[in-house]
Image: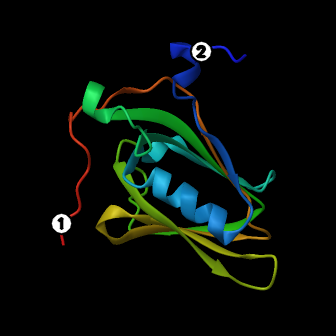
Amino acid sequence: MTDDARFEDGREAPLNLGALDQEDLKVISALVQDAVFPASEMAWRARDRRFALLLNRFRWEDRGRDRHGPERVQSLLVIENVLKVASQGVPRGDADTILSLLAIDWQPGEAPGGVLELQLAGDGAIRLEVEALEVALRDVTRPYRAPSRKAPTHDG
């Protein structure tokens, strides 16, 4: 005989995902769509070949949104094997600038390497040349009510 399900067993767990190929990356890209972060919360450690962002991610996967309203959660987006970083449309010297991540695109190069492009609102982008595709997304806080109390929308 099986035990009845408990309420605790149905709770949503923090995300802890990895991407080693383009299909996995599509999932992570969808989950970070509309994440916001201050420019001060991105770091490239050239010696470790690691680029990281601390994001305030909209919880697109949240099935309880109708019950408790839209939520965000702080998440780490970590990209390994980074050889080179370049940006366009990202203000330099203003750490308080808030950036909005729209998508992560993969452009394969000489296998297993390529280029990851983090598409930002306002035509900005962060371009990461990587030796191999290795991306991780991990929630690091409890969800909190989205300050706008609304889900992001896209016109057009």
- What quarter of the picture does the C terminus occupy? bottom left
Q: With respect to residue 25, does 7 lie above or below?
A: above
Above or below for 100 versus 9:
below
In the image, residue 139 above or below residue 86? above
Please state which of residues 27 and 8 is positioned toward the viewer in this rendering: 8
Q: Residue 35: percent from the left, percent from the top?
A: 41, 48
Residue placed farthest to the left in the image?
Answer: 155
Q: Amino acid at mark 2?
A: Asp
Residue located 75% across and 62% down the image: 20
**Looking at the picture, which amino acid does disc 1 mark?**
Asp
Q: Report the residue at 38% width, 35% height from top.
A: 72
Q: Which residue is mark 1?
A: 155
Residue 7, position as x, y percentages in the image: 51, 15
Mark sitting on residue 122: none
Mark 1 lies on a secondary structure that is loop
- Is residue 45 something one can see in this rendering? no
